[in-house]
Image (tube, coloured by chain):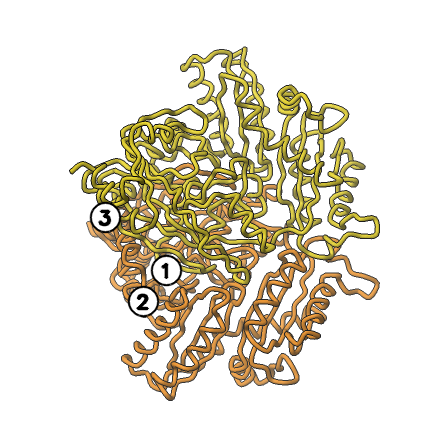
Chain colours: A yellow, B orange
Amino acid sequence: MGFIDTARGILGEAHVLTGPDASGYGRDFMGKYVAAPLCVLRPGSTAEVSTLLAAANDSRTPIVPISGNTGLSGGTYAEGAAMLSLARMNQIRDIREDARIAIVEAGVVLSVLHEAVQAKGLNFPLTFGARGSAMIGGALSTNAGGSNVLRYGNARALCLGLEVVLASGEVVDLMSELHKDNSGYDLRDLMIGAEGTLGVITAAVLKLVPLPRAYATAMVAVPALGDALGLLNRLQEATGGMVEAFEFMPGSYIDAHLAHFPDARPPFDARHDINLMIEIGATAPRDTTPGPDGRVPLASHLEAVLEEELAAGRVLDAVIAQNQAQRAEMWARREATAEVSLARAPQINNDIAVPLDKVETFLERMRQILPTVDPGADDTCVAHLGDGNIHYIVYPSSDEAALQDRLMERVEDVVAELGGSFSAEHGIGLTKLPSMRRRKNAAALRAMQAIKAALDPNGIMNPGKTLP
Amino acid sequence: MGFIDTARGILGEAHVLTGPDASGYGRDFMGKYVAAPLCVLRPGSTAEVSTLLAAANDSRTPIVPISGNTGLSGGTYAEGAAMLSLARMNQIRDIREDARIAIVEAGVVLSVLHEAVQAKGLNFPLTFGARGSAMIGGALSTNAGGSNVLRYGNARALCLGLEVVLASGEVVDLMSELHKDNSGYDLRDLMIGAEGTLGVITAAVLKLVPLPRAYATAMVAVPALGDALGLLNRLQEATGGMVEAFEFMPGSYIDAHLAHFPDARPPFDARHDINLMIEIGATAPRDTTPGPDGRVPLASHLEAVLEEELAAGRVLDAVIAQNQAQRAEMWARREATAEVSLARAPQINNDIAVPLDKVETFLERMRQILPTVDPGADDTCVAHLGDGNIHYIVYPSSDEAALQDRLMERVEDVVAELGGSFSAEHGIGLTKLPSMRRRKNAAALRAMQAIKAALDPNGIMNPGKTLP
């Protein structure tokens, strides 16, 4: 009996898709990777995942897990493989307010969880543009980041416990709610960010935080990126670490945004090279109780720091959102990145990280190097500046593969010289495999390969991804 | 040529100790484990560690890493093994203030690092009683916790990058300074908490935080532990997450403390069952600039919350430290735990964690169960209550091993029923091996053993520890 028949025996006919029913799953979010999967499995429980993986392991059938299909690195490319969709495992099992945890299945959509916990005055602060489709399982498997990492950490930092099914079908129960649990090797963090190559994440215990009662959001122009890091540090001290977002958009991105959205307004009267979007969030009544003028004290804290910096010449211009509509406009400008940057082709999208104090150096070096490799090339970026994470986009003069490879290698060279990483928050998948081969510490790669062989000896879990 | 001669060839005579010179290393902090090591190796560089491990691997010589020798679980027991001391690798290589990182070698003593970064207005917030001897390498290998985990996380959360030498001698360079770095499996977190069984940590990149400019510290008595969790959540909201320590001491601990230190003063005029030590720290001038009365606003925030809770009957008594001497007295009471509890024998020290909202349930169940197992037994505890971490100490009526095993098993039963862990922050070492065997998820144990075999095929790294 073939694997598809075995799977039908486990899940029933309705939950094993083949042919045209399966083909939609074979196309990734960006339309960059298109594959013909063997079939799509839609289990409804951890027990079913376990039985399916044991059967796949016996028959050496490759398994590619998929949840919201919003990955940016081709991590769910599944030519000839059985795709395992977590979409039916979408229960929020429990929200415990006093303990500030949510217990969820892997198929819970991020924005669904946001709404459920916000109704209780709490927040699950992992957020990014694709939150309306992205699911917890994929977010953990990618160790997703986004715009609030600065304050709350990435997916890894927000996960207390995990349930994972290994290639053998064994269920590793690490569903700890504990803030301290030193009982052997940290399998949880090993599975987070492993992109489904070591097992399938089926459930998680997530940390919740108090939902800010008020936000202060501003667009700020500064003379140089070095001033931006100083501003971040002063804001963190002045507010006691309340900075939720500290995002950088160069003038070139603002230009492209205005060109793409004819109704959009520029952030300032004058054009600036270094534009920051800053958001501060507070829970404490002393910061969030509106005064006689209707303004919250939080906004005054932000204003006071910005005024000092303006006076010192370290800030050129600043606009604080006066209402929710103005705040939404600031966020919309920032979150339009994918749409704005994808509108122009060909392009090379580098999701890189450098030390916090090296972002300026990176961009300066690229400005010098780019014309030497491709005189017709152009670049732009947006950056989670508070994390040193730059989405650095190069528009080469042609779609010649060799030219694009040369450009990527030069970006990697500069990143490596600065002690950075060629992959910050989008994962390796297929897209970054050449970079892993070229750039990752060789001893680390050998150790990863040894771990992969130990936990998935038949190599059925998301084969060909993450590790060269 | 034997291993000792090989090691002398690598390090020179002076740095390979044997016989009486080595025997001091064979005795652990508590005097519970005493062993005769083969020798003690004192390398001065990562390259020397690498060469030593390669030689040990070739000759199948067991290696037991040791740094400050302050472990509480027998993790450095080294009968017949070569102990590898990190003490000479004690350089603080760099402190980068704007990027808020310190780059250190494994042998840096925790309190030495504290002083170095505090001189620059920053803090490395990992702290516990043994900070004057404990070293970074051991703190990371144990994933140490302590009193500030609530706000800043444990050792794992404070480590950005790591350098590890594997059994083969290969140097895995993960010395990332990055806040986001998704490039393959999370080897850093795998090595943190592995207690030297997967490799030797030789250096680390650590996160620094702004040093609070002011603290508000209080002793608070509440009617029940349930009220304590509510108080913690209200304080976090009122201050915006500034609670640094939230420690619980039962009346029985206060009694024992007073008996042990005749000059000590009780925290309150009346005796209370539920005593909390709470500390809040702030960096923002609006919280830390003294008013006309010389008091900092931070103290008023704490006072305001405590007054509301007093009025509502959820707090029975409260004393806020009025000066540094009173603050020091509160900390001294809390940090005397080891001395106070070790003064009475026999004892069973359980370092356990339960969900935040289950601490009260755990202690109530033990109060019922203890007399049924050993009518003459007595208990006490101190707890990092904000982390659900209880140092639960049982004084059995005799030192009969079978009785002590039964008591430990019953503690573990209750912990397991509540979804807790038998090991919170002290590690497994030798002491908790029976608990690992009995209690850890079997599939997780098998996965750990597979990883151990993959990375240390000859089993030379700290053999017999952590994994049954």
Read off the residue under disc 2. Answer: B435
Q: Nearer the viewer, residue A450 or B75?
A: A450
State which chain disc 2 sits on. B
B360 w.r.t. A185: above or below: below
- Marking on residue B457: 3
Mark positioned earlier in the residue sequence (3 or 2)? 2
Quarter that holds the C terminus of chain A? top left
Q: Nearer the viewer, residue B278 or A249?
A: A249
A154 w.r.t. B315: above or below: above
Read off the residue under disc 1. Answer: A183
Quarter that holds the N terminus of chain A? top left
* Residues marked 1 and 2 touching at CB (< 8 Å): yes
Q: Quadrant of residue B347?
A: bottom left
Classify mark 2: helix, strand or loop: helix
Mark 3 burial class by Cα count in 10 Å: few <14, some 14-19, many 20+: some
Amino acid at dot 1? Ser
Q: CA distance from mark 1 to mark 3?
A: 22 Å
